[in-house]
Amino acid sequence: MAKKPPRDDVGDRNLTVRGPEVAAAGLPGVRHGLAAAMNHMGVRRTALTLLKVNQAEGFDCPGCAWPEPAPKHRATAEFCENGAKAVAEEATLRRVTPEFFAAHPIAELVGRSDYWLGQQGRITHPMVKHPGATHFTPLPWAQAFALAAEHLKAIEPDQALFYTSGRTSNEAAFLYQLFARAYGTNNLPDCSNMCHESSGVALGATIGMGKGSVTLDDIHDAKLIVVVGQNPGTNHPRMLAALEKAKQRGAKIISINPLPEAGLMRFKNPQKVGGLVGSGTPLADLHLPIRVGGDLALFQAIGALLVEWGAVDEAFVTAYTSGFEGYAAAVREVDADLVARATGLSTDEIEAAARLFAASEATVVCWAMGLTQGRDAVATISEVVNVQLLRGMIGKPGAGLCPVRGHSNVQGDRTMGIWHEPPTWLGRLGDRLGLTMPTRRGHDTVEAIRAMRDGHAKVFVAVGGNFAAASPDTDVTEAALRRCTLTAHVSTKLNRSHVVTADEQTVLILPCLGRTERDAQTAGDQFVTVEDSMSNVHASQGHLDPASPLLRSEVAIVCGLARAVLPDSTIPWESYAQDYRAIRALIGQTVPGFDDFEAKVRTKAGFTLPHPPRDSRSFPTPDGRARFTVSPLEVLTVPAGRLLLQTLRSHDQYNTTIYGLDDRYRGVKAGRRVVFVNPDDLAELGIADGSTVDLISEWADGERRAPSFRVIGYPTVRGCAATYFPEANVLVPLDSTATGSNTPTSKQIIVRLQPV
Ligand SMILES: Nc1nc2c(c(=O)[nH]1)N[C@H]1C(S)=C(S)[C@@H](COP(=O)(O)OP(=O)(O)OC[C@H]3O[C@@H](n4cnc5c(=O)[nH]c(N)nc54)[C@H](O)[C@@H]3O)O[C@H]1N2
Ligand SMILES: Nc1nc2c(c(=O)[nH]1)N[C@H]1C(S)=C(S)[C@@H](COP(=O)(O)OP(=O)(O)OC[C@H]3O[C@@H](n4cnc5c(=O)[nH]c(N)nc54)[C@H](O)[C@@H]3O)O[C@H]1N2
Ligand SMILES: [Mo]
């Protein structure tokens, strides 16, 4: 039997702390994943559902964007503990019905935690909050669309915002951007703006392609894998199996992280009998405990040593790159003292890493939020590119650049045109449909918040996500959302963004099908497509009965909105919703790399999009060469008595979806309001391990406070601290963003701890 949702919001009442674990996954992983699934679905549904995850005839795991092995190499259970939890959250038997909304006034719901809200289950009916109302009430779909249309027609197109989270399918994403642009705006902020935007900007400017240059085979064949600013044990557990395979073939692994993350130290493969017991495979050969924000300096120092040692692939550099002389001159000047201050690492540690780079004939560098969410994120990733260019590590088997994406289709959404800039192919799409497309750049996430805050944007529409909780500066963001005349949310589960409302505001909750569910349309059952972190596009089809007969697919909801808002539109919205082949045909005619889309995606393995640097060492930059870049090194200065705080994920959450209150690998049980600090820093600050503090962030425009966190003495690097988002988002100043990508600096907040 499935368990009932929690009634109380227990908070941190039962918090206990045990200290970090050293190995990831193995038997406990399987057990924890299955327990979560059974709480939500019961035994039979758990078994039926989990066997379809990431299989050729099944659905794409709604967890992360790590690729699946080729069909013949897939395990029967091609999912991980956290994939099982993601599936359970969606396939849960718990329901949020009109009776639920009648019993819970909005004023009560806004006081609930994200955990409590999410645990209530799947939303079953379209719901509305009318101006002046205290509760959400159900309404028919046609009325919901009419209401949205009324608001959108009353404003200028650039006063509307169309947000997307990265779970949206290619088909829904393509139609959604088409709808926004046919309506007249490029205001398409997305979760990428807070995630891998810095990677896209840095890679676009240096190698001419904003995507990673490796395939899964390259990971398996690599001789050196560098995992920097990423915690795969929690966030991409299936990546550990790939690292293990590479390791067994002789690869070395370097981990660069302020925390000794369990998954990088040792790994027990849950898909192998030997992995269920025993101590597992040691993964990292070298662990560099770097100071937060020190990676720019580290990669400059590594580059300097490689140049000094003559460990440069001169043939590659000459044939394919530009800017080497300037780069080499700049790194020769790198100041060792600055490097030491920025990284907190010894010369020996840095040399050990550089020697591994110099010795490797096939190196992959993988990174995630530890590199993208800091002030110098774009420059830092450009330094990673410099080092890979020096060694000729692009377009070579077993080598390349690997930004590991988050949401399962976040990369595909961008390919489909979910972007605040007009994509290169927009003109072609307009010509084909006889439309004039908007050319003015739209708002990204941070700009969207400012536009609402300042009264320039009036309507906020979201396909997926939890904008209120995921965005920086929670108080500012929530006040901004409350200034809109309408917010409308296409969602599977209840979340904070639905209940942050103002009295005079209209709010719509539009409940949609999830990945696991059958999508029946007039032309028969439909599948959708997604693109993983390595540019492989494949089909995804759910088989479960929908959580409620009233649910509509994301595609159908976008088409419903479009027809109501653009009644004179000549775009055949209705046929798109009936048969997704029509959408794929239009994508095939518009988006580069998607010719013959329908046939290619119907094969078991799907297809891999072209990537000129990876495929043929051709670089689509203005001069056709990969570019070395030079960036200044400015150490992040933290005033005395302050710490540099990073906000990260616990093992029991998916962004703002909280699966549970434990963080097993870091030894935390039954609580989330914790802050990890080095014991020596605690001693210096005169703060006791286990005591309670308020976190206060300091920024030019004033202070921000997150009250009541338990201090945990933890082996993080001196001067740095860590805590979980979304709780800590209240501390991230809206205007503190990465240069060049405008990504909030949610890994670099200057804070002081104030004992309470
Ligand atoms: N189960 C689960 N899976 C997920 C998600 C989830 O929430 N739960 N989220 C998905 C999404 S959207 C994303 S983007 C990815 C995120 O995947 P990750 O990027 O792995 O997620 P974070 O928890 O933010 O971890 C950041 C890591 O970077 C390290 N770090 C922080 N600052 C620095 C720094 O300055 N330098 C270096 N070298 N390291 C640093 C942290 O210690 C931490 O190990 O995961 C995806 N997968
Ligand atoms: N401080 C801090 N802030 C961060 C980060 C950080 O590391 N630190 N990380 C950032 C990152 S990397 C990201 S990607 C963003 C994430 O930002 P978002 O993508 O906006 O947030 P999520 O929590 O992933 O969204 C969860 C909601 O999506 C909805 N949902 C789930 N599945 C589906 C579906 O199939 N269809 C639809 N329509 N809706 C669905 C559910 O209603 C659920 O409540 O947060 C960012 N914010
Ligand atoms: Mo992300």
Image (cartoon, rainbow, N blue to C red):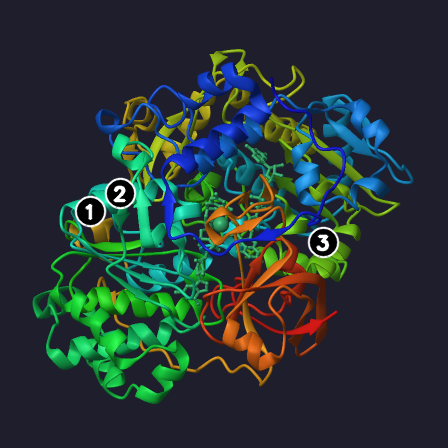
Q: CA distance from mark 3 to mark 2?
A: 45 Å
Query: Looking at numbered disc 1 in the image, what kind of residue is underneath it?
Result: Ala
Front of the two marks 3 and 2: 2
Identify residue for label 2.
Answer: 242
In this orientation, which residue lies closer to the viewer: 131 or 718? 718
Q: Residues within 10 Å of mark 1 (few under 14, many from 20)?
A: many
What percent of the width, then of the height, locates residue 720? 50, 71
Query: Looking at numbered disc 3 in the image, what kind of residue is underneath it?
Result: Ala
Query: Looking at numbered disc 2 in the image, what kind of residue is underneath it?
Result: Ala
Q: Which mark is residue 572?
A: none
Q: Which badge, 3 or 2, comes first in the chain's sequence?
A: 2
Q: Is residue 309 above or below residue 136?
A: below
Front of the two marks 3 and 1: 1
Q: Secondary structure at mark 2?
A: helix
Q: Residues within 10 Å of mark 3 (few under 14, many from 20)?
A: many
Q: Is residue 523 above or below residue 67?
A: above
Kindly identify the residue that appears in the image at 63 percent across and 59 percent down. Answer: 728
Kindly identify the residue that appears in the image at 64 percent across and 34 percent down. Answer: 490
Q: CA distance from mark 3 to mark 1?
A: 49 Å
Identify residue for label 3.
Answer: 457
Label 2 near label 3: C-beta < 8 Å?
no
Q: Is residue 34 above or below residue 692?
A: above
Identify residue for label 1.
Answer: 246
In this orientation, which residue lies closer to the viewer: 473 or 660? 660
What percent of the width, then of the height, locates residue 657? 59, 41
